[in-house]
Amino acid sequence: MSISSEIDVHDELSGASIGPFHKLLGILITLITLFDGYDTFNPAYVIHYVVQPWGLAPSQAGFLVSSGLVGFLFGAIGHGSVADRFGRRGTLLAGLWIVNVFTLLTAMLASDFWSYCALRFVTGVGLGVLLPLGTTFINELAPKRVSNTFSLWGVTLGWSLGGVAAGLVGVFLTPQHGWQILYYVGALSIPLTFVAHAILPESPRFLAARSRVPELRALLARLRPERAAVYQTATFASVDGTLPQSTIGALLSPRYRRVSLTIWITAFLSLFAIFGLTGWIPTVMLKRGETFAASFGFGALMQAMSFIGGLTLAMLADRNFALTPRYLATWWMSGGIAVLALVFVSGHGVNLAIVAVAGFCIIGAQHVLNNFTAGSYETCFRASGVGMELGIGRVGAILGPYVIGLLQQVTGGPDAVFWAIGGASIVGALAIGSLGLAAANRLPSADVAPAEG
């Protein structure tokens, strides 16, 4: 390639090796999503302490978990158009500051059911930015051949570690310091935010789409320093950065309609199962005779196993993009059957094994669905696509803890938890499996224009 050659940014990023700056940004996104995962899952460890003092029915206890997810819904759906118009970096930092401030206020001011839910709602708006935009950012940064695996290390590892950390704080610190300690620990994200201000660049594909050439040259030189001299004088192939008049219309256009609708249905069912499971598993395991420490430890176990399950699935997906829907279906079907087995079998060893399988399969698959979604749309509305997937999915997440709490209230026993979660996982498997090899008709990258005809 000559010094003056026109460079295709997509090809340039896809052909890069994972260098020091990739790793630095991956670590930063990992830490950001660690606090996202921590803050998302810690309400499960609040329920035990407030049900009696606040006089909560099971359905209200479920809404303690769901209240933050309602805010997440608005943040996930609303942030996409902002990020696609004004940039990934500023939107992500704004979400971080919302989480920082309202996490601290929850520890200081939440004194009853309504104040807790109100503060969690606003916190959820910020959380609704972090995970989808972190996924979008990593997808636009990573070489295509390892995008799923890099996303697992750069997004999912942090989210899973955050869930584990919430469980550990719940087990070891809440008995001595009360449930508020969960949120004081969560406020440790504030120093990280200052680091993010200093390090986090804008997405290279967003810079290309907006023709911000000097910034693009500097960023590419950090991502591929061996080609820095080429970037100084090269011109860049145009990238269509025109925002569609309606992002919903773009997501439901003939090219994307089937994939979009399938992803939305699957995300709804998957997150219904995940948040129903993570929100209720400590309480349900106490009812099944587990000790306090063991019951709270099940949540940490699920998050740890979810990373292993997601990483395994991501490596398979990177080998063959077209088979991703089938891999996802296999994971959710296996997890759903395992959870249903808890209706019929019991015992500490059985509980432990099935909860591990549920984390490996049900939560692990969701991580890969997020990246599959990001890889399915063009740069100009990719953030909107991921935001819609997680936003619609959060409707399921909101309903999961509440509906499962209501079912327990009606039936008087914990088996409703397993029927609801197992059933949702199996139906989700059937939904994504119906996509079959339709993905094979798509090009490896949605940033490349489809052939006509």
Image: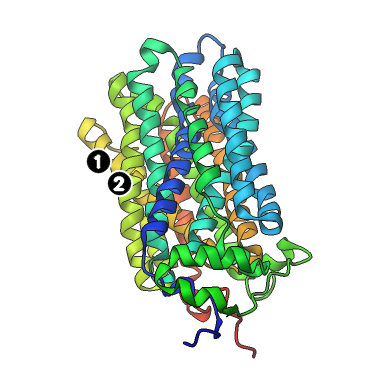
Between residues 98 and 391, which one lies in front from this camera angle? 98
Q: Mark 2: which secondary structure?
A: helix
Q: Give neighbour class at mark 2: few <14, some 14-19, many 20+ (Cα, 10 Å).
A: many
Residue, disc 1? 353
- Please name the amino acid that badge 2 sits on: Val
- Please name the amino acid that badge 1 sits on: Ala
Q: Residue at x 30, y 50 (%)?
A: 308
Residue 46 in the image, given as x and y percentages of width and height: 47, 21
Between residues 414 and 13, which one lies in front from this camera angle? 13
Q: Residue at x 47, y 61 (%)?
A: 430
The quarter of the picture where residue 380 lies is bottom right
- In the rendered image, the quadrant that contains the C terminus is bottom right
Residue 14 in the image, given as x and y percentages of width and height: 45, 73
Between residues 181 and 331, which one lies in front from this camera angle? 181
Residue, disc 2? 357
Q: Give neighbour class at mark 1: few <14, some 14-19, many 20+ (Cα, 10 Å).
A: few
Q: Mark 1: which secondary structure?
A: helix
Give the farthest residue toward the right. 245
Q: Residue at x 23, y 37 (%)?
A: 350
